[in-house]
Each structure stands twice: as C-alpha cells, then as structure tokens.
C-alpha cells in the first residue's frame, strides 16, 4: 500500500466507534495526546488503512476542515455492507446501485460529514 487517506474529526473517538460499527473498520492503533485527545489513529479495512485524529492537532490545523473528506473503498458484498451501515445509523446518500461501468456501489455520510463510498469496482 502506498496511499493512506487521512481524516480529522471534531471527536475522533466517536468517529472511530462509528467507522467500526457502521462499516466494519478494525482499530489498529490509537495514540493519545494531551487531554486524552486522539493524536493519531490507524483503522484497517481489508488490506487498506485510513489514518485519523482529532482536529486540534498541529497538522490538522493545516488540513481541510473536518467533514470535508471522501474516499472510495472496494468491497465484495456491497449490499451486506449497506445494510450494516444503515442499521448503525449511517446517513445513506446514495443507495446500492449498479453502475454502467460494472460496479455496484453506495455512498454514506459519517456523523461529521465525510463521504464514504463502497463498491465492487477495483481500479487496475
């Protein structure tokens, strides 16, 4: 892997809990800074990793504001993941749909506004 999406949350702990519950991410590492804020976290999904932390870190002050990110993640079973996300309270922006280019995908918004798209298309 060479590309690692990064996100900043107003409440990174709540973001981590949401990503685990709604989409099935697995907590790989969580590092705390002063006051128990999340300085850096790594969450695994399949063979990929996203990194995130609280918006109060020094780097986050340079980055786009919380809730402005989006990412596409390839999965095998779009419909099962959609049902899981929906059951966990994710805002479904686009429900599962077959695309002209052969993918089946859906998009959900996390509680801070980031868009998470999941589909069967895998770029080569």
Image: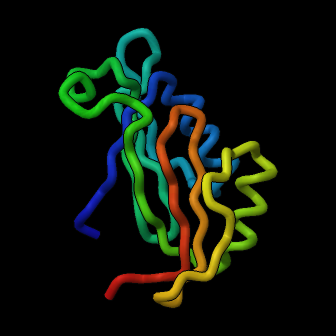
Q: Is residue 33 above or below residue 75?
A: above
Q: Quadrant of residue 33?
A: top left
Colour mapping used in the image: rainbow
Q: Is residue 31 above or below residue 76?
A: above
- Please identify the quadrant where the N terminus is shown: bottom left
* Residue 88 image position (x, y, % from top left): 76, 46
Q: In the current view of this chain or complex, which residue is farthest to the right?
A: 87
* Residue 59 image position (x, y, % from top left): 21, 28
Q: Which residue shows up at 59% across the image and 34% down it?
A: 111
Viewed as shown, does residue 106 lie left or right of 86?
left
Q: Which residue shows up at 44% across the image and 64% down it?
A: 72
Q: Which residue shows up at 67% across the image and 52% down it?
A: 92
Viewed as shown, does residue 1 lie left or right of 109?
left
Instruction: Pick the residue in front: 48 or 64.
Output: 64
Q: In the current view of this chain or complex, which residue is farthest to the front?
A: 100
- Please identify the quadrant where the C terminus is shown: bottom left
């Amino acid at each position: 892997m060479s590309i690692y999406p990064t996100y900043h949350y107003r409440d990174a702990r709540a973001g981590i809990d949401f990503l685990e519950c709604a989409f099935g991410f697995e907590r790989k590492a969580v590092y705390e800074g002063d006051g128990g804020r999340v300085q850096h976290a790594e969450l695994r999904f399949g063979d990929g990793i996203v990194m995130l932390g609280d918006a109060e870190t020094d780097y986050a002050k340079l980055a786009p504001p919380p809730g402005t990110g989006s990412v596409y993640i390839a999965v095998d079973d779009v419909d099962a993941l959609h049902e899981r996300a929906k059951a966990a309270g994710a805002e479904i922006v686009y429900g599962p749909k077959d695309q002209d280019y052969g993918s089946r995908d859906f998009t959900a918004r996390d509680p801070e506004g980031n868009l998470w798209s999941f589909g069967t298309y895998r770029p080569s």
